[in-house]
Image (cartoon, helix red, strand yellow):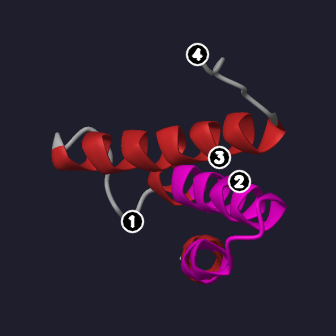
Amino acid sequence: MELLMINWSDIIGSFGVTLLLIAFLLNLASRISKDGLTYILLNLIGAGLAMLASWLIHYIPFVVLEGTWTLVSLVAFFNYFRKRLSN
């Protein structure tokens, strides 16, 4: 019988994916807005952690996926503050 071996990439990736799912579920439940800072930060941090975990296990397709998600979230983050400053 093989023991379950948990390493840092599992922990980092699990935390990142959990943040992404929390953002998704809270948005579906109309608890947070997709344009709100909480949603943007959950996506930014979650995708960044998922990307890091994918990098650690050398799984390039998910590095690309999560990296793209991180960049889109980063743009949303800067746009959020740009809109707030212009008001």
Residue 81, which numbered label?
none
Residue 66: image x %, image y %?
59, 71
- Residue to which mark 2 is pinned: 49
Mark 2 vs mark 1: give the one in front.
Answer: 2
Q: Tell me which numbered mark, 1 or 3, is placed earlier along the sequence.
A: 3
Q: Quick one: SS at disc 3?
A: helix
Callouts 2 and 3 close, C-beta under 8 Å? yes
- Where does label 1 land, which residue? 35
Location of residue 18 with respect to 24 vertically, above or below: above
Identify which residue is drawn at 27% across, 49% down: 27
Residue annotated with mark 4: 1
Q: Nearer the viewer, residue 78 or 70?
A: 70
Find out whether the residues at labels 4 and 2 contact each other: C-beta distance under 8 Å: no
The residue indicated by pointer 3 is 13
**In front: mark 1 or mark 3?**
3
Position in image of residue 67 (x %, y %) = 66, 78
Label 1 SS: loop
- Write the start and end of the magenta stretch as one range: 41-66
- Which comes sooner in the sequence, label 1 or label 4? 4
* Chain-order first, disc 3 or disc 4: 4
Q: Secondary structure at mark 2?
A: helix
Depicted 13 relative to depicted 63: above or below: above
